[in-house]
Amino acid sequence: MSSGAQTSKRNDIQGLRAISVLLVVAYHAGLRLPGGFFGVDIFFVISGFVITASLKREYEQSGQIKLRSFYFRRFKRLAPSLALVVFSVMAITPFLLTPLDAKLSTATTGLAAIFSISNFSLILSQLNYFAPNAKSNLLLHTWSLSVEEQIYVVFPIFLTLIFKLKKIKINYLY
């Protein structure tokens, strides 16, 4: 890691990240503290902030945003862990779940998670997140990662357009 990347790490953001993760973990541990979904929301906002700051810094330094590099960095950071989780869960699913429907639901969600669309897969399957049978889908929680990955796809393109429009506007005004 370069020294520039190290100096841009903010402890306040890392602290908020920790709080959001603790809220989600507490919720899933059954503590029923209000805030499990709030923790996910906080994490989404932090991701947006970090992406914006990173891409803004890149644009200010080079005059452009290298989307291919950005997507490759996201892929390298997220894909190995996601693959490990999905494949590990799929390996133990036959031993943990007995109804065939639960195994199929978990497998479908796992495949969708690999392609960052488990949120859409869960919507299409009409699985109620809070229903008692939802807990039998061992990869139910991947919906939030899919949403975040979808944000990673769309938001940098949006930001690139904003930066370009801002530059055009400034050139025409002055």
Image (spheres, rainbow, N blue to C red):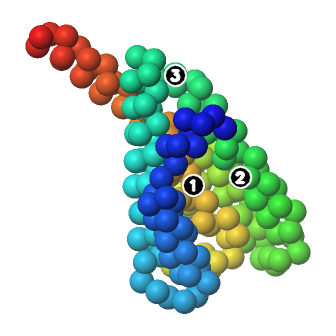
Q: How far apart are the alpha carbons under marks 1 and 3?
A: 23 Å
Q: Of the residues shown, which amino acid type is indicated by label 1? A: Leu
Q: Is residue 37 above or below residue 173?
A: below
Q: Secondary structure at mark 3?
A: loop
Occupied quadrant, residue 166: top left
Answer with mark 1 or mark 3, whichever residue precedes in sequence.
3
Q: Position of residue 119 (x, y in %)?
A: 53, 56
Spatial CA distance of label 3 from label 2 is 24 Å
Q: In this view, which residue lies farthest toward the left?
A: 173
For the N terminus, which image quadrant?
top right
Which one is nearer the viewer's eye here, 130 or 147?
Answer: 147
Q: Is residue 159 left or right of residue 110?
A: left
Look at the numbered disc 2 and give the secondary structure of its residue: helix
The residue carrying pointer 3 sits among few (fewer than 14), some (14 to 19) or many (20 or more) residues within 10 Å by Cα, namely some
Tell me the tag on residue 66: 3
Q: Nearer the viewer, residue 153 or 66?
A: 66
Residue denoted by label 1:
145
Q: Circle 2 sits on which residue?
A: 82
Question: What residue sits 65% from the left and 52% below the top?
Answer: 113
Q: Residue at x 57, y 24 (%)?
A: 68
Q: Are marks 3 and 2 in contact (CB under 8 Å)?
A: no
Check whether the beta carbons of the residues at disc 1 and disc 2 lie within 8 A of each other.
yes
Residue 100 visible in the current orientation: yes
The three-letter amino acid code for the residue at tag 3 is: Lys
In front: mark 1 or mark 3? 3
